[in-house]
Amino acid sequence: MKPVHETGGTEPAVRNGPSVPPAPARMPGSRQSGVSLSGVDENTDRVSVQVSEGVATIRIDRPPMNALDSVAQRGLRRAAAEVGDRRDVRAVVIYGGPKVFAAGADVKEMVEWDHLTAVEKSAALTRSFSAVAEIPKPTIAAITGYALGGGLELALCADLRIAGDNAKLGQPEILLGIIPGAGGTQRLSRLVGVGRAKDLIYTGRFVKADEALAMGLVNQVVPPDEVYEEAVALARRLAAGPPWALRAAKTAIDRGIETDLATGLDIERAQFAGLFATRDQNDGMRSFVEHGPGHAEFEGC
């Protein structure tokens, strides 16, 4: 939840598988035309939803650093609800544009907070990020430039993360006398382990893309101008899969990791058995028997 000033585009001061069709390249740098645009008012909420061929892009657009103020947070909640509900959306990309993913929450809102305000505002921020984490479809964070504080916490809400080789990621809140307040102490430690999470949170240091890849913080590193295309290509591949099975896998993993092994196995078993009520299971297995793997077409029912 690292606050940053929204003025100026300089670096925040610190101390220390199957083939996929080519992805469209229209999003970076400008709003994409010829797609379905959500009811979210992007001028008000600073967040838009654009849908093309089963893939939704949740676009954060608050230059220069995409600071996540309360208005942007509300936009994230609305966007998450929309893409979760829409049947024409089967995978989601979260994108901050070609220069920066998101550099944190907005210090101009936070600097005057008292304790009661912090309690109220942090609850709203947590609700916004949890709404993104709970989208019942595969989600991919497309990270260019900075993903710091709240920006990294937002990226941690995605299932997968693709970063540009210019990306810098971190939880520098400690340098402001606070700690991450939107999931950083929890999601980061679950993803990269307690020791690495404590290193990043205690020191507030930034990690470059190659180190982030080595520690499992991101799944893939590509040139910056290919980040969005790679994220959409992966999203299209996932969108072609069985949506109910993907939802079940996400549920089993996300719920199972929160509990003991025996309970997690029960969650997995229930999700597994439930898929035998879907047409996709029948089509997928029959296609495998008759034609071998990789030939099924899934309708999402």
Image (cartoon, rainbow, N blue to C red):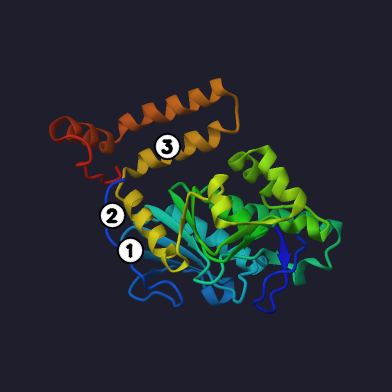
Which sits earlier in the primary sequence, circle 3 or circle 2? 2
Q: Are marks 2 and 1 in contact (CB under 8 Å)?
A: yes
Q: Residue at x 52, y 73 (%)?
A: 42
204 vs 26: above or below: above
Mark yes or no: residue 131 visible.
no
Numbered label attached to residue 248: 3
| Comparing labels 3 and 1, the label whose residue is closer to the camera | 1
Q: Residues within 10 Å of mark 3 (few under 14, many from 20)?
A: many
The quadrant in which residue 66 appears is bottom right
The answer to whether 194 appears left or right of 290 in the picture is: right
Q: Position of residue 20 (x, y in %)?
A: 28, 54
Numbered label attached to residue 23: 1
The quadrant in which residue 282 appears is top left
Q: Residue at x 33, y 55 (%)?
A: 236
Q: Amino acid at mark 1?
A: Ala
Q: Nearer the viewer, residue 125 or 67?
A: 67
146 vs 249: above or below: below
126 vs 70: above or below: above
| Comparing labels 3 and 2, the label whose residue is closer to the camera | 2
Numbered label attached to residue 67: none
Q: Quadrant of the C terminus?
A: top left
Q: Position of residue 155 (x, y in %)?
A: 56, 55
Q: Amino acid at mark 2?
A: Val
Q: Quadrant of the N terminus?
A: bottom right
Q: Amino acid at mark 3?
A: Ala
Cα distance in 3D space between marks 3 and 2: 23 Å
Q: Nearer the viewer, residue 238 or 251?
A: 238
Cα distance in 3D space between marks 2 and 1: 8 Å
Is disc 1 placed on a helix, strand or loop?
Answer: loop
Is disc 3 placed on a helix, strand or loop?
Answer: helix
Q: Residue under label 2, please give it.
A: 20
